[in-house]
Amino acid sequence: MSKKALADLTWESKMSAPERAFYNSDYLALADELGRKRVEACVYEPVSFKLPGGSYTPDFMLLLEDGRVVFVEVKVERRTKSGRYFRGRTYRDSRSKIAAAAAVNPWFTFYWAFETGGGSWRFELVEREGGVYVEDRRSNRR
């Protein structure tokens, strides 16, 4: 089997740069925010949720030592010159899907992980009612 074929079998060949950074070690920053629980497993795109009007595949699933399952959607967040936040073209679509998935799956926890540059992350807990509850928690791992 060629190196390219072998690389295509790995998760990292499909990941974006922020997803790769989150997977390699930055998911530990979110684990700290969740009460310093040990992460038993961090899996890339393990499941798809069937939702009214389509489906949603979260970027990561974290299995915590206390049995909780946390799904994470990773996005890039940058500030424009005017001071506004830019989260990329796919943010709007993901926002509605993750809110719907959280609403119909109340036994799971859903988070946004925004890579803000320089190894920093900002996390947002997705509320079950469909809105997003913003926690001003920042991490500077690395």
Image (cartoon, rainbow, N blue to C red):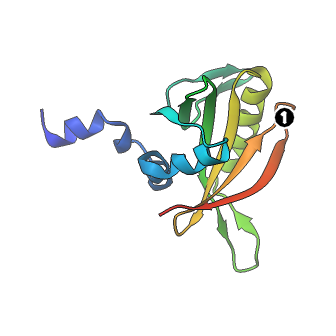
Q: Position of residue 109 (x, y in %)?
A: 70, 31
* Dot 1 crowding, Cα within 10 Å, few <14, some 14–19, many 20+: some
Residue indicated by mark 1: 130
Tell me: 91 left or right of 48: right
Q: Position of residue 43 (x, y in %)?
A: 47, 32
Rendered residue at 59%/43% (across/down)? 31
Query: Extreme left residue here?
Result: 1
Q: Position of residue 141 (x, y in %)?
A: 52, 61
Depth check, front residue: 42 or 94: 42
Image quadrant for the N terminus? Answer: top left
Secondary structure of the residue carrying tag 1 is loop
Residue 66 appears anywhere in the view: yes
Rendered residue at 55%/28% (across/down)? 65
Rendered residue at 21%/36% (across/down)? 5
In terms of image quadrants, where is residue 58?
top right
Indicate the amino acid at tag 1. Answer: Gly
Rendered residue at 75%/43% (across/down)? 125
